[in-house]
Image: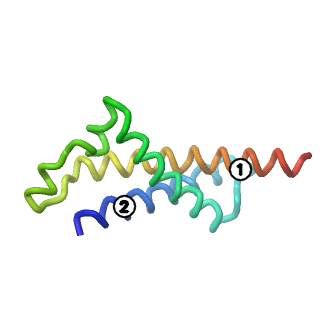
Amino acid sequence: MEVIVPILVQLVAGGVGGNIIAQLAKSLSLGTVGNSIVGAVGGIAGTWLAGMIPGLDGLVGATAGAAGAAGGLDFGALAGQGVTGLVSGGILTAIAGLIKSSMAKA
């Protein structure tokens, strides 16, 4: 269960981030389902990348193995993963929306 909860947090936060960026910039929208899927993938990928960057690995709990060993959840790491998923989901949705709109113009 300790493995599933962080992944769910990253997926949901990424999907929310994708939909928020699409609401702010209508030209980047991929549709509700597209924004959610691309944002969720961005949430997972961005959190994974943040865990590999020194200084950000503590934010997403990549080095916090003590909580898993103790059998509890690290709520600070979950919050960091949520924020990272939100931002990276929005970024990936914006990139995909830019690619889509530039291909439509060509």
Q: With 69 as the anchor, is 95 left or right in this view?
A: right
How many other residues sit within 10 Å of disc 2, few (<14), some (14-19) or many (≥20)? some
- Residue 13, given in percent of the width and then of the height, sits at 44, 56
- Residue 105, given in percent of the width and then of the height, sits at 90, 47
In the image, farthest residue toward the left: 70
Residue 7's disc is: 2
Residue 8: image quadrant is: bottom left
Q: With 32 as the anchor, is 12 left or right in this view?
A: left
Q: Tag count in the figure?
A: 2
Q: Is residue 105 above or below residue 12?
A: above
Secondary element under disc 2, as helix, strand or loop, is helix
Name the amino acid type tagged 1: Gly
What is the CA distance from the residue labelled 2 to the residue labelled 1? Answer: 24 Å
How many other residues sit within 10 Å of disc 1, few (<14), some (14-19) or many (≥20)? many
Residue 36: image quadrant is: bottom right
Residue sitting at x 80%, y 49%: 101
**Which residue lies under the disc numbered 1?**
97
Name the amino acid type tagged 2: Ile
Secondary element under disc 1, as helix, strand or loop, is helix
- Residue 12, given in percent of the width and then of the height, sits at 44, 62
- Residue 98, given in percent of the width and then of the height, sits at 73, 45
Residue sitting at x 19%, y 53%: 74
Q: Quadrant of the N terminus?
A: bottom left
In the image, farthest residue toward the front: 52
Residue 43's disc is: none
